[in-house]
Amino acid sequence: MSLAQVPNLIPALPELFIVCVAMALLMFGVFQKQDPASEAQTTKLVTYLAATALVLAILWVGMVSEVRAVGFGGLFITDPYGGFFKVLVLMASAVTLYISQDYLKRQGMERFEYPVLFLFAVLGMMMMISANDLLSLYLGLEIQSLSLYVIAAFQRDSLRSNEAGLKYFVLGALASGMLLYGSSLIYGFTGATNFDALAQALGHAEHAPSLGVIFGIVFLMAGLAFKVSAVPFHMWTPDVYEGAPTPVTAFFAVAPKVAAMALFIRVMMGPFGDLIAQWQQVVVVISVLSMALGAFAAIAQTNIKRMMAYSSIGHMGYALIGLASGSEYGVRGVMIYLAIYLFMNVGVFACILAMRRGDRMVTGIGDLAGLAKTHPMMALALSLFMFSMAGVPPLAGFFGKFYVFMAAIQANLYGLAVLGVLSSVVGAFYYLRIVKVMYFDPVDETLDRPLPRELATVIGIAAVFITFFFLYPPIVLTNAAAAAASLVGG
């Protein structure tokens, strides 16, 4: 084999590291003793090794993402934009693995396959973020999805967990079909699947793109909208969030959403960036519908996990405002929003994991009654997360919404910005209701105390970040600006 035929593996070093660790941990787990005591010890060890590997992968990402590089014949790309989102995915995955330990032990779910599936899901997400071709896009999406289907149904003895996994699988297969159909239409009418080739073919056309390409883009957007649970492709979200094990729900709420939004932006701003007139109105519509549904549907919820599902639908609607603007400023706004969204959601789900009475998990909003009297610090932290999600200044959530709304105004999308502010006001109702329940409702039955160390640590760090973000916002803003410039300006 000549040197020219040897693929450049440097851009994919973080992904290669993750897949090697995943395979090694899989083999390690398989050859251990299978009695319950040994399996519990093996699971704990594999989980800590997997979390450590995810942290080390952040260092790999920092090393290879400083400049734009393409590998595997143009299928794979690394750049500061991809590096920013990969760091978010790796952080979210490591934290959710860390806070899973106590839950797995209490629920009798200590099986080494759990952290291994996390690693394979993360591998798929990282490939999605670095996809530079419709083929590698689909490959990364399916590696992620196949792992997530299994993780959703990981609590085998729970009917609700099995139902969550099955619903996610069936609807995910439908979304994959739409995405593939859109990709085939785009290939059929342009003769290319590579993002750079598509950008060149569509950007220098003397006439408007053909109807086939437009239909292809719409189907592609439908598949990607499913992955970010944007309306009208959100129907799986509440049931899967409620039925899946709580640490899995925490994982679903953050890492896959961040990866899918990163892919959504790269696809629309890259190969189809010059066709913004054709796809902008579609993004505006799904953004408005997502914000509206997230604001109004969550009001009637009594289960906090279902409420967070509708909340996440609304948050994806806000993030899509930045994409709808079609500008570098808008992309930066989405990146800032998702970085803050990560800390808010991880903090909230750590609080939900701490909601226990004996051996029983409780997830009703009413179960938080009187929390301020029995768990004052946890109630304070959860209040901060709720205020931040509502966008109350000077908490971090305010800055996330501020930058996406400003991007819409700069793009002359005044109506979209106004609708975003109005839905944010409506959404504040159900966030503030939780604060009211914690501080003003009488204690019915107290939750367990003290909190497990892992949960207390994560809640504390997330609360500090959310509260004091305004003191030094450049920690996120500077990196987001450089990353957005590498995508849109590069």
Image: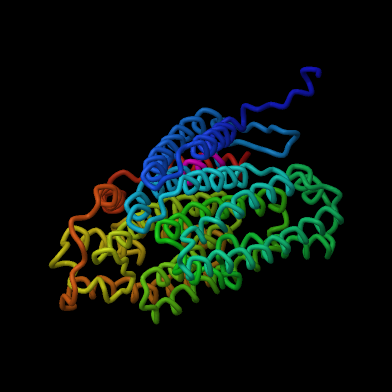
Q: Position of residue 434 (x, y in %)?
A: 28, 72
Give coordinates of residue 150: x percent, y percent: 55, 56
Colour approach in the figure: rainbow
Name the residue at 19% across, 74% down. Answer: 445
- Is residue 474 visible in the rendered image? The answer is no
Q: Position of residue 19 (x, y in %)?
A: 58, 36
Snapshot quadrant of residue 149: bottom right
| Residue visible at 21% across and 61% down in the picture | 380
Question: Can residue 222 be seen here?
Answer: yes
Residue at the image point whose x is 25% and y is 51% from the top? 452
Seen from the viewer's position, the closer of residues 71 and 50 is 50
Q: Main secondary structure of the magenta part?
A: helix
Q: Residue at x 18, y 69 (%)?
A: 446
The C terminus sits in image quarter: top right
On the image, the x and y values in percent for residue 184 come to 81, 56
125 versus 389 height, above or below: above
Quarter residue 231 falls in: bottom right
Residue 457 as seen in the image, left or right of residue 322: left
The N terminus: image quadrant: top right
Residue found at the very far bottom of the displayed protein: 300
Direction from residue 48 to residue 5 in the image, left or right: right
Q: Is residue 25 magenta?
A: no
Total number of numbered labels?
0
Q: Residue furthest top?
A: 2
**Left or right: 70 with respect to 37?**
right
Stretch of the chain drawn in magenta = 82-89
408 or 140: nearer the eye?
140
In the image, is 104 to the left or to the right of 418? left
The residue lying toward the viewer, choosing from 100 and 207, is 100
